[in-house]
Amino acid sequence: MAFTAADVKNLREMTGVGMMDCKKALTASDGDMDKAVEWLREKGMAASAKKAGRIAAEGMAYATVVDGVGVVVEVNAETDFVGKNEKFVDFVKGVAATVAKENPADLDALMECKYNGTDLTVTQQQQEMVLVIGENIKVRRFARFEGGVSVAYVHAGGKIGVLVNLDTDLAAEKVEEVGKDVAMQIAALNPRFWDKSQVTQDVLDEEKKIMMVQMANDPKMASKPEQVREKIVVGKLNKFYAENCLLQQEFVKDNTMSIEKYIASAAKALGGTITFKDAVRFEKGEGIEKKQENFAEEIASMVKG
């Protein structure tokens, strides 16, 4: 299977590994992206693949709480310039308000809802925005939390929108700071799972396999008996949880505790209970491919060579 300059760039952004090694990995894996990631990890070059693929599209990810209802939306545009346009931002906020009020079942249902404060549907309002702004604009996705206490966080003016949902016996304003801290952690580290209980057996099996191959490739470890290596793997899995599961992650603001312990500590200090229930993280353009420009041309010769 052939691969392109864009594939090399995508693999580099997914793993943080240099271009030439990414090219070697794709060559060794016959262009298969998943196998290339595994090849790099087995060689010890990549710690893990990022949850998101290449980030390319523009627009805005936005999170808010409207009358106790938490909403996060993503609306795409063609250029970063439009993503900062006041009319576009107002449109995105109106989409979020519509989601909060109408509780649509899915994206198709949302597009048929009356856009907040107008007699137009969301589809019609979107078409109006295309005419006014002169770019293709598209409501891409949304999520909504009605129960519990939701806390919204928007990073870098709309690059990332995070919505955290907590179960608590405390007033919403009292847990705002806790929710914001957890949301900022999610925005920064993009955990694959919320809790280690969500890690499936097939993921664990894959991690164990990669760890065993890494040790087999390490002269110091390769000489150890397999039982010893398996015990080391069990220890390494705890590190995997700490890197990939939100509640087990080290709290960025205080590295002496995990997020789980931070929430428990904050709840005790506030005199109540707080439990993390769920969260949604949208990054604008996540997984959307966009036309490759100069960078692809610069590395095309490497791929052909």
Image (cartoon, rainbow, N blue to C red):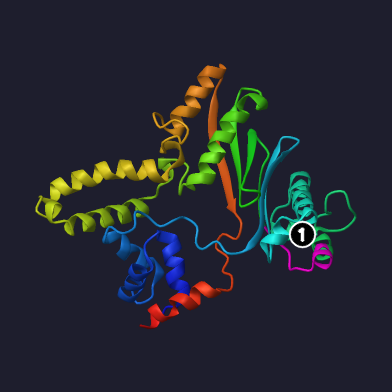
Please report the bounds of the magenta region as a residue range. Answer: 129-140
- In-image side of 265 versus 86 (left or right): left
293 to 84, vertically: above or below: below
Question: Which residue is depicted at the point 37% across and 62% down?
Answer: 17
Q: Nearer the viewer, residue 50 or 121?
A: 50
Q: Nearer the viewer, residue 177 or 209?
A: 177
Residue 24 position by quadrant: bottom left
Give the crowd class for mark 1: few <14, some 14-19, many >=20 residues within 10 Å: many
Quadrant where the C terminus sits is bottom left
- In-image side of 126 versus 14 (left or right): right
- Residue 132 magenta: yes
The spot of residue 107 in percent (x, y) is 70, 58
Q: Could you tell me the amino acid type at mark 1?
A: Met
Question: Which residue is depicted at the point 61% across and 52% down?
Answer: 159
Q: From where the camera sits, is residue 1 visible? A: no
Residue denoted by label 1: 111
Q: From where the camera sits, is residue 40 visible? A: yes
- Residue 103 magenta: no
Question: Which residue is depicted at the point 10% across and 50% down?
Answer: 224
The spot of residue 174 in percent (x, y) is 63, 24
**Outermost right residue:** 119
